[in-house]
Amino acid sequence: MNLFQSITSALDNALSRDPTAVIFGEDVAFGGVFRCTVGLQDKYGKDRVFNTPLCEQGIVGFGIGVAVAGATAIAEIQFADYIFPAFDQIVNEAAKYRYRSGDLFNCGSLTIRAPWGCVGHGALYHSQSPEAFFAHCPGIKVVIPRSPLQAKGLLLSCIEDKNPCIFFEPKVLYRAAVEQVPVEPYYIPLSQAEVLQEGSDVTLVAWGTQVHVIREVATMAQDKLGVSCEVIDLKTILPWDNETVCKSVAKTGRLLISHEAPLTGGFASEISSTVQEECFLNLEAPISRVCGYDTPFPHIFEPFYIPDKWKCYDAVRKMINY
Amino acid sequence: CEKACMMYSKFVFIPVTRLHEKAGLLNCVSHFASEATFDVKKCDLHRLEEGPPVTTVLTREEGLRYYRTMQTIRRMELKADQLYKQKIIRGFCHLYDGQEACCVGLEAAIKPTDHLITAYRAHGYAYTRGTPIREILAELTGRKGGCAKGKGGSMHMYAKNFYGGNGIVGAQVPLGAGIALACNYFGKDEICLTLYGDGAANQGQIFETYNMAALWKLPCIFICENNRYGMGTSVERAAASTDYYKRGDFIPGIRVDGMDILCVREATKFAADYCRSGKGPMLMELQTYRYHGHSMSDPGISYRTREEIQEVRSKSDPITLLKDRMVNNNLSNIEELKEIDVEVRKEIEEAAQFATTDPEPSLEELGNHIYKNEPPFEVRGPSQWIKYKSIG
């Protein structure tokens, strides 16, 4: 299955196991602009899979209400770039509901899904990666898969999780990434980073599409520099698995973090700061962050903007020679 | 035409009446009417005692001008479609063909010093507000000759008193009210036309803006371009009330036939006079239609039938309506209008040529215009060793 088919499969499993689950968002009924919800309305009916009008703040607010009343709400925001009208609802309402009511109420059964990341021709408003804005908000979970197999497991875990979750789906991988994915439900635990490749010289950390870039960089570093890289997929941005990352840096002594979002205030800064606190004496070189430029996502400069393998490779080289 | 007359008179004497039969030469012998009166559809009214007039006068000069402008926009959009399919234009492209009467009609009723802001289906407005065709097409292809230096693309075109070109649905409406407040503040008798679509009409910020505009009596005309589909969702499935002209509740509204340029012009004049007199905002719903899908990635036929599109094209096409009116009332003839078509085609071809050959902006542009700073500052790049200078 490719990524959107694995999402459909996960949603199918969720709706069949949980009779209270509902899916809603803009254009989800016919299948969604990325075909993630194809066939679900026919299978489960109009009262469980339905369209909302064009109102993100309304969608999330409505989703919080559905979740508080006890049903499982799976809201779709059409592009992560459009999530900002709903930012208030997510940060002020969803994240703080359990806390402010002393655990009397919660909207844990809310999951928000949104396509995320650059796609080659998205320009300013169809390419953003806003995970850093939400990482600053205790009370929600932010999850980003790197492949169809991961996506289905992580999405099902998000839906099961008793906390409001935001699930960002790398839109460039919707068709491009294809894997063997089981049809039955399975769960991948949240807040656990995965070491994809063991190494001894440099730790490379990324999430979503960027994981594939750093895997390539690891191969390049091995071939050209003889450098052995440990590749980690962070998977959950909030709460993030600092144990795995710190353990790895304690072993290698060098860290490179890479993401498409702009450098200043991007999530790499949080990782970098925590790692230097925990592993200061283990560090052999300053922690490297290879990220997007501090500009709005450009219309035509995209190939220059994104942190591609060459920029990451260059950073690895500089760290090794520090 | 003058040359042709002279040629004929050099070689042979032909009576004027025979000349008449030789079509195409007669434009210089002006036997056209200079103006004609037309009936326009009565507009539905909300909280108004009387509406725009039901008859209007169209002069020959105006008619030719509107025809040329609408035809230019039509051909420009079709050229953009072609360039997109050739992958010379990439990214997002929301085409305006079918809705030309709206932008040309609106522009005909306001002054160049008035202000206008709209959403992403903005190529028509960029043109009517003064951007040359070549700059629009160059912006679409992302070249430095584009009106936004190639950095904005389809959705972000700007001109004097035209504030774009906005990607986020509904986000431009509060901006429009702000512009209207500034008009009031500067006391220059200007108004702001704030446009949005039937999909955006359900956004919360629109209603917040209605409240502010009415409370402070801002000279703002809210215009809902209802083309019946918000992307792929028909208005019946998206809105509890499809009477978009009534959605302003306490704001008076009119519903206008957006395929008839004269109806749009009269309604806008009426609304503009209302706003300029300090009575506060007004809402106009333009009932219109788009032939293309929502954007170039939407074929446009999965949520509506080809028959429906064909029907609108044959019965209510704005350019055809104007053409028929002009020809049937002797304001012009088929040949003259065909000449205009040919000239327009040539103009668009030249603009497209420019748009495909102009160079792209240089890489230094990537960091420019983020902030306004006197000394250029450094923009951090993907790693600590890459920095770009940003010129504000």
Image (spheres, coloured by chain):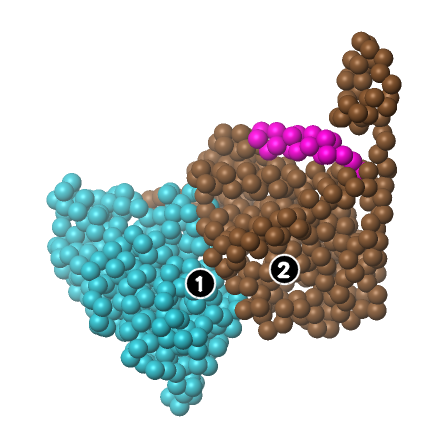
Chain colours: A cyan, B brown
Would residue B214 be counted in the magenta stretch? no
Q: Vertical placement of B319 versus A274: above or below? A: above
Q: Is residue B344 magenta?
A: yes
Does residue B64 appear in the picture of this structure? yes
Quadrant position of the N terminus of chain A in the picture: bottom left
Q: Quadrant of residue A160?
A: bottom left
Tag 2 subunit: B
Q: Secondary structure at mark 1?
A: loop
The amino acid type of the residue labelled 2 equals Asn
Q: Is residue A113 left or right of residue B251?
A: left
What residue lies at 80% left-to-right and 68% top-to-bottom? B48
Asked if both marks, 1 and 2, belong to the same chain, the answer given is: no
Q: Residue at x 28, y 73 (%)?
A: A13
Where residue B335 sits: x, y (%)?
72, 31
Which residue is the extreme one toward the top? B11
B197 on left or right of B84? right
Front residue of this view, candidates A69 and A99: A69
Q: Amino acid at mark 1?
A: Gln
Q: x, y percentage for residue A138? A: 37, 74
> Which percent across, then down, holds residue A37?
37, 66
Q: Which mark is residue B226?
A: 2
Q: Is disc 2 surrounded by few (<14), some (14 to 19) or many (20+) residues within 10 Å?
A: many
Quickly name the residue at label 1. A78
Q: Secondary structure at mark 2?
A: strand
Magenta extent: B331-350
Count of labels shown?
2
Residue A235 can be seen, yes or no: no
